[in-house]
Amino acid sequence: MARLGAEVVGADASATNIEVAKLHAAEVGVNVDYRATTAEDLADAGETFDVILNMEVVEHVADIDLFVAKCGQMVKPDGIMFVATINRTLKALGLAIIGAEYVLRWLPRGTHQFGKLVRPEELEKALGAAGMSVIDRTGVVYHPLADRWQRSKDMDVNYMVLAEKGSV
C-alpha cells in the first residue's frame, strides 16, 4: 500500500516478509514505513491512502470479499486500487502452479492453491461492492525466449485490474 506524496507504507501480515522488504529497501536507499499487519487492521485503525497496491495478494487471503472491502474502505475519494493476481483456470493451474512452482521452481511448492485463485468477474464484483469502479484490466504473459513479462489481452493466467473510488 502506498500514499502519493511524502509517505509510502508497505504492509504484509508476515513479519518475515516485512523484515526481508526492509533489508531490500535499505540496500537501495528507499524510505518505506513497513508494517507487519493486515489490511483489515489498517482499515479498522482508520488508515486511508490515495493508492493501494495489492500485488499477488488476493489469491492468498481467507475471505476475498472482506479483504477487498477493507482495502476499498482505505481508498480516499478519487483514489485508486491496483490488483494483480492469478485467474482460476486450467491454464493457470498448468502454468502458474505446476509450471512455476513444480517445474521451474520460481516459487516454493504449495505457494498457490487452485481453489483460492480469483476469476476476474469475482474480483470485479468484490471491487464494486467495495465502492470501486473498474477502469482498466489487462492480462500479463511471460515470454520465455525474451525472458520478460508484458501486458496482453490474455487474462487466462496472470491479470491486473485498476479500480477507482469516486468523489464524495
Image (spheres, rainbow, N blue to C red):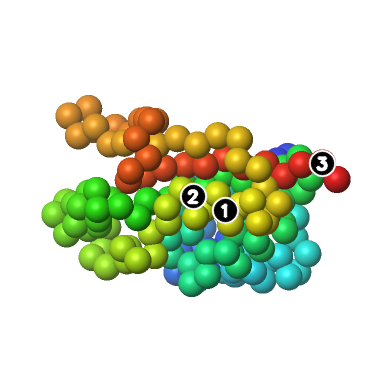
Say left or right for 5 vs 86.
right
**Residue in the picture at 65% in, 43% down:** 133
The C terminus lies in quadrant:
top right
Asked if marks 3 and 1 touch (Cβ < 8 Å), the reply is no
Say left or right for 54 vs 78.
left
Label 2 sits on what residue type?
Answer: Glu
According to the picture, the residue beneath numbered tag 1 turns out to be 125
Q: Which callout, 3 or 2, points to the residue nearer the camera? A: 2
**Residue in the picture at 35% in, 55% down:** 88
Label 3 sits on what residue type?
Answer: Ser
Label 1 packing within 10 angstroms: few (<14), some (14-19), many (20+)? some
Residue 159's tag is none
Q: How many marks?
A: 3
Residue 121's tag is 2
Residue 116 location, quadrant: bottom left
How far apart marks 1 and 2 lie (CA) works out to 6 Å
**Residue in the picture at 75% in, 55% down:** 48
**Residue in the picture at 27% in, 68% down:** 110
**How far from the left and from the top, in percent, is residue 159?**
41, 42
Asked if marks 1 and 2 touch (Cβ < 8 Å), the reply is yes
Q: Which callout, 3 or 1, points to the residue nearer the camera? A: 1
**How far from the left and from the top, in percent, is residue 78?**
76, 40
* Secondary structure of the residue carrying numbered label 2: helix
Label 1 sits on what residue type?
Answer: Lys
According to the picture, the residue beneath numbered tag 3 turns out to be 167
